[in-house]
Image (tube, rainbow, N blue to C red):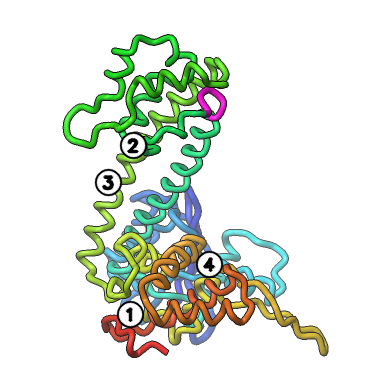
């Protein structure tokens, strides 16, 4: 087989070609730019070898490889991605003290000879990558939203700490609209009541606020809040950011749901798994055929416990490895919370682990591993969830 290794970079890539059988370097490492001319140069050099069985390998390092991968797939080349951790370990095994693009290209080419190091990339897998970009962006925006909401509450605790004792819903349209106009108790206390009523009124459809302007003004008069123009400006800025991001999150939710309906994955048959959580898990897992057994999937998710042995010592209680994607683990923990709530078998399993003295988080971890075994079964057999078959 012909092995073509590429060390990808931001502005240029380095490639080398090896004969798998003899180990001969057919094309010494050469550089080509990350643009159309560079891609054409690469293809012209390797074209003479691709009529034979071949593989083009790159490290799975993120966005630097995306455009090049699209080009290679359009040319019907067989593309493989190698885990960067594997190349790092192989470099140490070979005693390579120096690291540079040329040596890395040859190293990657050599690793293509062993299937355990790489995974195949196809047009379909690139669609999964697009879904992964969507779901990760969704979770990133949610994290930022939570941070800004906490900042908003901190600021309100300074300018109008009594605001949240009222019976309005936090972050509702009336709540955000009113506080964007009146961001402190002092600005409310001296305002005309008619203007305050107007600030509470919502245009168009939607539930009107149950809190009255009179209630707010009376509370503001007795408030211990500080009159601080800097904090007031921060509140208005945060509300504008939160409102804009809310709309962005809503758009992403609809797009992810569209992907979910197109895929119609059996993962959605598990009670308690929503479109967002299900697609987040699927996007991070990728092709289930890359995993020979459920244990491999558990390890990929970083949910396998670490092992520490030295001589006669064998550590009994070790944390999970946390290898791989943090987005996958986050989605799994979110999923297992609702799965344990809606499925009696998972609920009983969680209760059993708690009765054995496991902590809340540890018991959840056991349930996540059980959930991964179920997911592996459903995806690998393309079958729907059946609680009677879980044990």
Q: Which residue is mark 2?
A: 172
Q: Residues within 10 Å of mark 2 (few under 14, many from 20)?
A: few
* Residue 300, horizontal then vertical, whole percent: 51, 74
Badge 3 is on which residue? Answer: 251
Q: Which residues are magenta?
A: 157-161
- Towards the viewer: 351 or 283: 351
Q: Distance from label 2 to label 4 (Cα)?
A: 37 Å
Taking the image as shown, residue 264 lies to the left or right of residue 161, namely left
Specify which label sits upstream in the sequence, 4 or 1: 4
Whether residues under marks 3 and 1 lie with C-beta atoms below 8 angstroms apart, the answer is: no
Say which residue appears at 43% left-offset and 82% top-offset.
373
CA separation in Å, label 4 and label 1: 20 Å
User: Seen in the image, is 123 located left or right of residue 326?
Assistant: left
Residue at the extreme left: 204
* Local SS, label 1: helix
Name the residue carrying label 1. 379
Is disc 2 in contact with disc 1, using a CB cutoff of under 8 Å? no
In the displayed structure, 119 sits above or below 34; it is: below
Pick whichever, 346 or 119, lies toward us.
346
Does the CB distance between marks 3 and 4 fall below 8 Å?
no
Element at label 2: loop
In three-dimensional space, the C-alpha distance between marks 3 and 4, rounded to whole angstroms, equals 28 Å
Q: Which mark is residue 63?
A: none
Question: What is the number of callouts on the image?
Answer: 4
Binning the other alpha carbons within 10 Å of mark 3 as few (below 14), some (14 to 19) or many (20 upward) gives few
- Mark 4 is surrounded, within 10 Å at the Cα level, by few (under 14), some (14 to 19) or many (20 or more) other residues, namely some
């Amino acid at each position: 087989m012909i092995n073509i290794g590429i060390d990808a970079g931001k502005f240029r890539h380095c490639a080398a070609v090896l004969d798998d059988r003899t180990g001969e370097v057919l094309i010494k490492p050469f550089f080509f730019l990350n643009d159309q001319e560079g891609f054409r140069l690469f293809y012209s050099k390797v074209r003479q070898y691709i009529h034979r069985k071949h593989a083009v390998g790159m490290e799975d390092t993120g966005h630097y490889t995306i455009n090049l991968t699209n080009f290679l797939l359009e040319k019907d080349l067989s593309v493989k991605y190698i885990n960067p951790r594997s190349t790092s370990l192989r470099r140490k095994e070979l005693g390579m003290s120096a690291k540079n693009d040329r040596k890395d290209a040859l190293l990657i080419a050599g690793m293509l000879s062993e299937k355990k190091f790489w995974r195949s990339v196809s047009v379909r897998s690139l669609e999964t990558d697009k879904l992964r970009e969507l779901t990760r962006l969704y979770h990133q925006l949610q994290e930022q939203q939570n941070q800004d909401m906490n900042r908003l509450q901190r600021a309100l605790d300074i300018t109008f700490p009594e605001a949240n004792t009222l019976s309005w819903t936090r972050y509702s349209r009336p709540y955000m609209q009113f506080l964007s106009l009146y961001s402190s108790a002092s600005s409310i206390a001296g305002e005309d009541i008619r203007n305050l009523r107007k600030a509470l009124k919502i245009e168009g459809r939607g539930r009107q606020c149950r809190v009255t302007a009179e209630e707010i003004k009376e509370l503001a008069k007795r408030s211990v809040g500080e009159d601080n123009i800097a904090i007031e400006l921060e509140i208005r800025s945060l509300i504008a950011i939160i409102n804009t991001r809310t709309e962005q999150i809503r758009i992403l939710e609809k797009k992810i749901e569209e992907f979910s309906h197109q895929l119609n994955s059996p993962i959605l048959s598990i009670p308690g798994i929503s479109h967002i959580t299900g697609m987040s898990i699927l996007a991070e897992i990728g092709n289930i055929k890359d995993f020979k057994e459920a244990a491999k999937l558990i390890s990929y998710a970083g949910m396998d416990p670490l092992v520490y042995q030295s001589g006669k010592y064998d550590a009994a209680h070790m944390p999970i490895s946390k290898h791989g994607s943090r987005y996958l683990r986050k989605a799994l923990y979110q999923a297992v919370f609702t799965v344990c709530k809606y499925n009696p078998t998972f609920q009983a399993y969680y209760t059993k682990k708690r009765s054995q003295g496991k902590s809340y988080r540890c018991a959840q971890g056991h349930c996540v591993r059980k959930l991964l075994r179920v997911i592996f079964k459903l995806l690998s057999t393309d079958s729907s969830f059946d609680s009677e078959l879980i044990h």
